[in-house]
Image: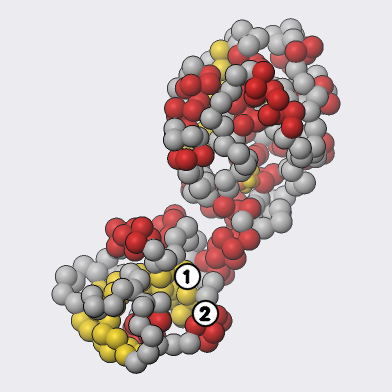
Amino acid sequence: MKAIVLISGGLDSILAAKIIKNQGIKVIPLKFNIPFYQINIDKYCGKNLFDFVKANLGEELKIADIDKEFLGLLLEPRHGFGTHMNPCIDCKILMFTKAKALMPKLGAQFIVTGEVLGQRPMSQHKRALCVIEEQSGLKGLLLRPLSAKNLNPTIPENRGWVNRDNLLCISGRSRRDQIKLARDLSISGYPNASGGCLLTDRQFSLRLNDLIRHRELNLRNIELLKFGRHFRIGPQTKLIVGRNEKENRYLEEKVKSGDLLFTPEEKVAGPTCLGVGVFDKEKITLSSRIACSYSDLCAGELRVAYRIIPDRKNKYLNASLVKKDSLAGLLV
Ligand code: SF4
């Protein structure tokens, strides 16, 4: 008997997997990649998610990309958004439908998730759990071990593949039960907070909304949203300002043909700024002034170098500071 366990990256899905594994079922850990996860390697005590899963389940984590399909959800999610730009119900229906399609190939008889009844307001109340199960075509084949005793018995329980007596009845937002269970099951190195999905972050959602309104939703632009300060300086033009050395390097690595790269002259420390979209003389001047404003210059003017990728040769502009207050309206 085999079950696909959907791994979120948090503690709950590992607990669910372990409970099922302890019933003698072979678990197949599977994670769906969407472009909105903020995976921080430190979250797993220096290990990455692959190591964390292997260490605790003894199985290799499988990854499946659903990037492109996910973007479609953001434009018109059938079940709407949560507090921010998180279309959680549609997201789960998409992931579970994909998991169902993989069942024959992976030889799995059912699907397991770490969902907990009442843990999240949008997607984990009883009605939402039923809608997700039905609309992903998994009626009776979706087992949520952490809350199973609060829910109707599933096919794996009814047929005796798993023992319902050994499943749990956790509900609500507290993580106390899960932390105790992790201790009992000797699971270590799990992240403190669940989630990591940037769609639940207010600031990120505002930036994303700006991309959608300007019809600029694509994987590259989403990746760029994760770094720097973002200025909307025209309907088709953005300037991204690095906030530290790491972001400056990242922006330099991410340039594409047609982008502009701005850097204040070497004598004064300043940010690398990536210009994306349509630039005229006026926007080049404004971008140079913004670059200047985030440099160490206190007053006067600064020579800002810029180049249009793939040109290797810099052009230069003397730019003056702009008051940060007057840039507030451009900041996304
Ligand atoms: S938080 Fe993000 S990854 Fe999780 S269900 Fe919602 S949209 Fe999907």
Ligand 1 under 8 Å from disc 1 Cβ = no
> SS class of the residue under badge 1?
strand
- Quarter containing ligand 1? top right
Residue holding disc 1: 230
**The image quarter in which residue 320 lies:** bottom left
Q: Residue at x 49, y 34 (%)?
A: 45
> SS class of the residue under badge 2?
helix
| Sequence-first tag of 1 and 2 | 1
Can you tell which mark lies on residue 215?
Answer: none
Q: Quadrant of the C terminus?
A: bottom right
Colour pattern? secondary structure
Q: Position of residue 126 (x, y in %)?
A: 82, 36
Q: Amino acid at mark 2?
A: Leu
Q: Position of residue 235 (x, y in %)?
A: 48, 78
Residue holding disc 2: 330
Placement of 36 over or under 180, stated as above or below: below
Q: Position of residue 78 (x, y in %)?
A: 69, 51
Q: Amino acid at mark 1?
A: His
Question: Which sits in the foreground, 192 or 96?
Answer: 192
For the residues labelled 1 and 2, the Cα–Cα distance comes to 8 Å
Looking at the image, the residue that sits furthest to the left is: 313
Q: Position of residue 108 (x, y in %)?
A: 57, 17
Ligand 1 under 8 Å from disc 2 Cβ = no
Tell me if 28 is positioned left or right of 114 in this view. Answer: left
Q: Residue at x 53, y 52 (%)?
A: 71
